[in-house]
Image (cartoon, helix red, strand yellow):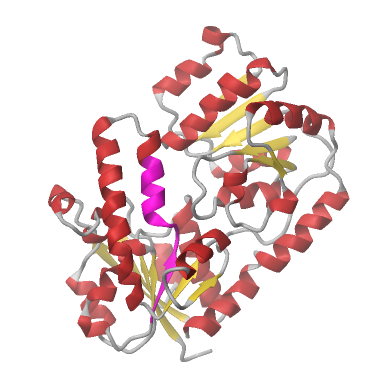
Amino acid sequence: MPDTHLHIVSFDIPYPANYGGVIDVYYKAKALTEKGVKVHLHCFEYGRKPQVLLDNQFFKVSYYKRDISKKHLFKSVPYIVSSRTSERLIHNLSKDNYPILLEGLHTCSVLEDPRLDDRKRVVRTHNIEHEYYQNLAKVETDIFKKYYFYNEAAKLKRYEKVLQKADMLISISKNDEAYFSTLFDKVDFIPAFHPFKEVNSKEGKGGYALYHGNLSVAENTNAVKFLLNNVFNSLDIPLKIAGLNPPRQLQNLLNTNGNGASNIELIANPDDDKLQELIENAQLNISITAQKTGLKLKLLNTLYNGRHCLVNEKMLSGSELDDLCVVANDQASMKRKIRQLFKKEFNSSGIAERKQKLNSLYHNGNNVERLIELIV
């Protein structure tokens, strides 16, 4: 495909690919490149540094400073959109007639520029953003952040109508596809792109349960508190909690001298190799969430690399992965199923079932071919 070009406008620099949204962006762009598409990657920059690896990997990479000044808080346009407007971006996109893939509602100010009205513009929806921000507000304890999240949610709901100007929406989950299909005409579903090529789950048994996630995020901190106070408080089963930047409050709660919970261990800021080792050797990986939007990529990680996977329904969220997980939605059923799974060997038939399901639905190679058909 020597003459096929595509602009991708990313809300962040997608490398290192170490959190949900950028994992999809990076591995999608990588899969497109491997199919011969010349990717023009446009990245908004804030906090992360430009990456030589991206410059070497893609046809052209451009960076734009995200304007994170407080003036955007007082605009009617959502902060996540208003802070990602760039005249230089519009100028660069106007130099040719290649199709444009916009990553998330964050980058959709591009849809409002009449200079690009004659271009094919497709939006990858990473979430139902106003629902996501409403849920952030519900779990936030800081009064100012809570107000910001609720205010942003209202703005995002109003702003969503800009998606009518896109030629197509490509959702990341079946739930999101169902929602957007009630509002817009051309909506398709392509699952998240990811780094996993094959199922590497180990047979046999592990010696602990594992919860992992970014522990600086309130939702994940609340999940850990629920597991400690309501599930493992009466289970004599080892639980390891691994993740980035655990807050002091959580560290105090996990202090074994303070609560006598000798079966609980905190692993703060594990590197990638350590985290993968923890996932692979656990008897069961626990993934629970209060948010049902988007797709949790850590769920894919545990299914490709771990043994038993215990989740609540919200974690599955239109992922089509229900058959591969054990579901529990309250503390009583979680305790019961953890006890059962801790005794149960993970065998070759479980691995075969994962291979069949994941290779049919979440195979990057198949999904990128569908994406090329839709966009270019």
Which residue ends up furthest to the bottom in the rendered image? 3
Q: Write down the region rendered in magenta.
A: 121-136
Looking at the image, residue 340 lies above or below residue 279: above
User: Which residue is nearer to you in this view: 119 or 244?
Assistant: 119
Q: Is residue 29 shown above or below 6? A: above
Report if residue 36 is visible in the image. Answer: no
Name the residue rendered at 19%, 56% in the picture.
67
The answer to whether any part of residue 301 appears in the image is yes
Relative image position of residue 371 (x, y in whole percent)? 54, 77
- Give the image quarter of residue 359: bottom right
Q: Position of residue 10 (x, y in %)?
A: 37, 65
Rendering coords of residue 369 (x, y %): 59, 79
Looking at the image, is 169 positioned above or below residue 207?
below
Where residue 265 sits, quadrant-wise, is top right
Residue at 21% across, 59% down: 77
Position of residue 182 measured from the top left corner of the image (x, y, whole percent): 46, 68
Q: Residue at x 56, y 33 (%)?
A: 242
Q: Is residue 311 magenta?
A: no
